[in-house]
Amino acid sequence: MKHNILLTDPYHPIVQETVSSLKALEFVGHIFGASDEIARLRPSALRKVYYVPGPDAEDYAQQLLSDSDAQALAPYAGLFREAGHVLVCLDPDNVLLCSDQWDTLQALGAASIPVPRSHLASGARAVEGCAADLGHPLHEVYVKLRISAGGRGVWRISRDAGLAHNGAIPALPLSAMCALIDYSVPTEGVVVQEAIAGGVDITSYVFAVAGEVIGATYRERWKSTAGLSAEGMIGPVPEDVGHVVREVCRALQWDGLGNIQMMRRPEGDTVGYEINPRTAGSIGLTRHAGFDFLGSVLRRVLGLNGNAAFAAEPVVPTVFRRDWSTEARCP
């Protein structure tokens, strides 16, 4: 029996790795995209789901893997379940929590998990004060939309006077950042956060049930393009990262599939700075390290493993690099 997968952002270049992985699984059939009109796929970078087929429609997905729209879909997890289908993302409560940058930091801090120094600010004057408290202009500072996903809505307050857009995160001088805040006026405020200098950017995809970690991955990101992984390494989960992952899942009673973003500081400690209540295309890269994490999750959700343990194969450290001019995977 084949099952359908719905990807909300199927044509994003980095999602192609996941799509190819899914097609290689014998139980996966057609792959849908979300759209605002029936039978019309919408381009990448969806901000919300505009159309999900009804349970009686022929193209209703029997399995759902949400790449960027868990926040829009998770509240309807009960309806999917009643229709006999499974939503593969975090449970609705954690989706709402992790979609809020500030609430995420507060929850992690309450669980004694190290987080970057951060402030919640509303208005340009408050941003100025928070930036100064975090060491600007001697140190760079980030400003993040409180409600955001997938690296969107993140700026770096630069110590330079000019504008910069050629890095992983766009940089603005403080005066321009404050002008932007005054112009956009986010009603929920913005998060002003210290930049962790010299650390290693880490992402761990995690599948847990009722707070117990069933499986996890480890990815270092060495280079980014528009906030997406362009170069890095997939490897075994180090003990310090595994400890943070277990503590996060226990504290949040994590249930489902998502990813935790961390920084390993030069001092040796691991700091959690963001949780995404969804997966992303780069999860498919685990196949090249000898661990088909996504396939194992889907087999577990579909009940294809029987009583067998989660298929955690040995992970071979594997470096990846992407050529963004051709969207091709390079060795």
Image (tube, rainbow, N blue to C red):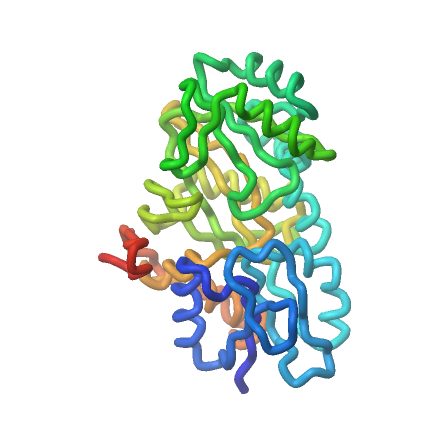
**Image quarter hosting the C terminus:** bottom left
Residues 248 and 49: in front is 49
Residue 42: quarter of image: bottom right
Is 217 located above or below residue 266 in the figure?
A: below
Whole-percent x, y for residue 233 in the image = 32, 48
Whole-percent x, y for residue 120 in the image = 66, 26
Q: Which residue: 74% across, 63% down? A: 76
Residue 98: quarter of image: top right
Is 9 located above or below residue 150 in the figure?
A: below
Task: Report the side of 229 relative to 129 (left or right).
Answer: left
Residues 212 and 109: in front is 109
Task: Report the side of 233 relative to 64 (left or right).
Answer: left
Residues 193 and 314: in front is 193
Whole-percent x, y for residue 285 in the image = 37, 59
Q: How many marks?
A: 0
Q: Which residue: 52% across, 65% down? A: 297
Is 260 located above or below residue 19 in the figure?
A: above
Residue 74: quarter of image: bottom right
**Image quarter hosting the N terminus:** bottom right
Q: Which residue: 41% across, 23% down? A: 162
Residue farthest toward the left in the current orientation of the protein:
331
Residues 264 and 173: in front is 173
Q: Which residue: 41% across, 28% down? A: 265
Task: Report the side of 92 relative to 35 (left or right).
Answer: right
